[in-house]
Image (cartoon, helix red, strand yellow):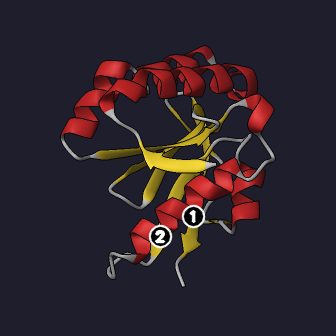
Amino acid sequence: MEVIELQKMEIRNALDIVWKVFLEFEAPDYSEQGIEEFSKFISYDSIITKLGEGELHFWGCKVNDKLVGVIATRSINHICLLFVKKEYQRRGIARALFELVKEICRKHKHIGCITVNSSPYGVEVYHRLGFEDTDQEQTVNGIRFTPMSYLLK
């Protein structure tokens, strides 16, 4: 297992993983508006622009040189995407990706926590990673999420 920063040429593949996993595990809990909003958020052009401006950082986990999971952060310490292919879930991929984000955040002494707006499907995963809810589930533009944070020690 190898966790690396993704290059521009790998972003389409990463977004394909995100979309496929989203459709299977997240979309059933979302309204049409939420699905459309998420689709807009992960559009290739939007992501590439945000990467180019340094607003977004994207890493991937490879197993046998095959991309199987991705994590993206906004402003270094806010997780905005964490998706693992179905057949690789529950194998430590999400944890490995999160450990990299923790390591990067710890290098920035002013960062005290990592945040995420977890989808309903991801809440249990984030709890297992050590996140705590900071508010109740909300819906904005059809996107359902629970605000959560992880205190860096």
Horizontal relation, residue 12 to residue 1: left or right = left
Q: Is residue 83 left or right of residue 39?
A: right
Locate residue 135, reporting x and y percent.
Answer: 61, 61
Seen from the viewer's position, the closer of residues 92 and 138 is 92
Q: CA distance from mark 1 to mark 2?
A: 6 Å
Q: Contact, CB < 8 Å: mark 1 with mark 2?
A: yes
Count neighbours of disc 1 (C-alpha within 10 A) and say few if under 14, some if 14 to 19, many if 20 or more. some
Q: Which residue is mark 2?
A: 103
Mark 1: secondary structure: helix
In this view, the residue farthest toward the front is 64
Q: Read off the residue under disc 1.
A: 99
* Residue 3 position in % (x across, y down): 53, 50
Instruction: Tell me: residue 106, above or below residue 82.
Output: below
Q: Report the amino acid beneath label 1.
A: Glu
* Image quadrant in which you'd find residue 110: bottom left
Asked if residue 34 shows in the view, the reply is yes
Residue 30 rendering spot, x and y as whole percentages: 66, 25
In terms of depth relative to the viewer, which is nearer, 121 or 49? 49
Q: Is residue 142 above or below residue 138?
A: above
